Amino acid sequence: MNRPGTHPRQQDSLITSEQNRAMFNHIAGYYDGTNRILSLGLDGWWRRTAVRALAPVSGRTYLDVGCGTGDVALETIRQAPQSKVTGIDPSPGMLEIGRAKIGNAGLSDAVSLVSGDVLRMEFPDGFFDGAITSFCIRNVTDRKRALAEIFRVLRPGAKFVILELTEPAGPIMKPLFSIYAKVVMPMVTKVLSSVSAYRYLSDSMADFPKSDIFSDLMQKAGFVDVRNRRLTGGIVTLFEGWVPTSQP
């Protein structure tokens, strides 16, 4: 958030794209294990839920934006065998780990993880049958442009799913999460990963727009029937939207 007397940010995210890439390169080797511990094992269930919402179909082609270490891409293939997934991510460190996972699973023909920027994708219009992004859109410097690019590369009728960490609300979850973020997360990350990176995580959750505001941004990008639902008391939110079957 901007402090009184400061100039408004010229980007949506709290850090620049270069800082984002450097941060994820730094924590890549610890990313999966730290997330399992910090989420109490729920991160896998969140991703499975998001892929179920996408409802992938065997034989079709999907885009995973901010694919990281490849867990969503792997889950997509698990739920829809014979489908194809292309994942893009700006972090070489995360991609290296993801490619190793894909290779170990024998799915190199089904999943391709490539270096890419969601603000400037090289795919043709209407190329994918669906798209998904998990724990990524919070870090994008220009969300309006990113949503427009994702909309562009999806065919008419395609579904787009966003899974994102959000700050929980309510008299119980909000104070509990505040304690967890200020006390537990620093203790865990001091041992396993990077305290500063995971401090950014809680800060960026607080900075992310309210669900209705972000849903409106999706609608302005062209998506229809946009909806959102909170999971685990609002610690994560699932956003869904469709590309219209025909343009006006």
Image (cartoon, rainbow, N blue to C red):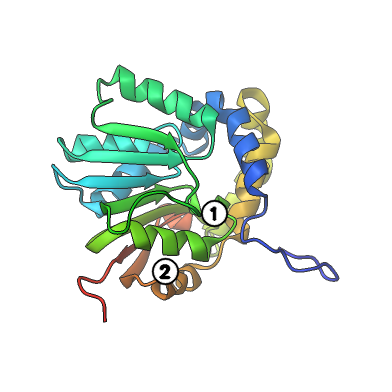
In this rendering, position of residue 20 left or right of residue 114: right
Which disc number belongs to residue 153? none
- Pointer 2: what residue? 218
Which disc number belongs to residue 138? 1
Q: Position of residue 61 (x, y in %)?
A: 23, 45
Please, what secondary structure does the residue beneath circle 1 have? Answer: helix
Near-viewer residue (189 or 183):
189
Graded by Cα atoms within 10 Å as few (under 14), some (14 to 19) or many (20 or more), the crowding at tag 2 reads many
In this rendering, position of residue 219 left or right of residue 225: right
Please, what secondary structure does the residue beneath circle 2 have? Answer: helix
* Amino acid type, callout 1: Arg
The quadrant the N terminus occupies is: bottom right
Q: Position of residue 93 (x, y in %)?
A: 54, 27
The quadrant the C terminus occupies is: bottom left
Please name the residue shown 39% across and 25% down the image.
Answer: 99
Graded by Cα atoms within 10 Å as few (under 14), some (14 to 19) or many (20 or more), the crowding at tag 1 reads many
* Amino acid type, callout 2: Met
Q: Residue reaching furthest right?
A: 5
Near-viewer residue (201 or 225):
225
Up/down of 236 relative to 48, above or below? below
